[in-house]
């Protein structure tokens, strides 16, 4: 019985992890599509020089998340800050999830 219980728990844990990672991947594809749009429109003046243009791209992607993570200390040209990037990414995922939920609510009306 313990063996079955352990196997069952492991299977449920695995399924939960796979479910979460695929959900995050879908959210990431959605905001990355918005990122490409920002690079091609609002931030085109940086002409693919993203060392200088990442603040523009992040602000275009989400003014709310940008203000939350980068407003008080914008990225310097060429700076890579993975800790703040992860915070920004988490914020973007939440924001995209909320957008998707609102769309679903509107579609169900």
Image (cartoon, rainbow, N blue to C red):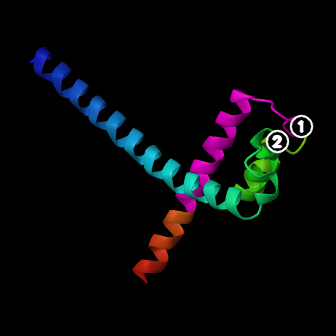
Q: How far across and down, in percent of the image, does residue 57 sit?
A: 74, 52
- Examine the image and state in which quarter residue 36 appears: bottom right
Please give the name of the residue rendered at 57% of the width and 54% of the height, measured from the top-left corner.
Answer: 31
Residue located beneath label 2 in the image: 70
- Label 2 neighbourhood size at 10 Å, few (<14), some (14-19), many (20+)? some
SS at circle 1: loop
Looking at the image, which residue sits at the far top? 2
User: Is residue 92 rendered magenta in the image?
Assistant: yes
Image coordinates of residue 95 in percent, x first then y, are 61, 56
Q: What crowding class fits label 1: few (fewer than 14 Cα within 10 Å), some (14-19), or many (20 or more)? A: few
Q: Residue furthest bottom?
A: 109
Q: Vertical placement of 24 versus 80: above or below?
A: below
Residue 83: mark: none
Report whether residue 43 is seen. no
SS for tag 2? Answer: loop
Q: Which sits in the foreground, 86 or 12?
A: 86
Q: Disc number at residue 73? A: 1
Classify the position of the C terminus by image quarter. bottom left
- Is residue 54 or residue 3 the one in the foreground? 54
Specify start and end residues of the magenta stretch as a single range. Answer: 74-98
Nearer-the-camera pick, 93 or 40: 40
**Distance (Cα) linking label 2 and label 1:** 5 Å
Residue 82 can be seen, yes or no = yes
């Amino acid at each position: 019985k313990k063996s079955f219980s352990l196997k069952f728990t492991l299977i449920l844990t695995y399924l939960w992890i796979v479910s979460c990672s695929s959900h995050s991947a879908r959210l990431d594809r959605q905001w990355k599509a918005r990122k490409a749009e920002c690079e091609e429109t609002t931030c085109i003046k940086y002409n693919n020089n993203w060392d200088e243009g990442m603040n523009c791209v992040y602000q275009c992607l989400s003014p709310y998340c940008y203000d939350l993570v980068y407003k008080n200390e914008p990225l310097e040209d060429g700076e890579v800050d993975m800790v703040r990037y992860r915070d920004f990414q988490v914020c973007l995922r939440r924001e995209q999830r909320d957008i998707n939920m609102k769309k679903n609510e509107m579609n169900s009306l």
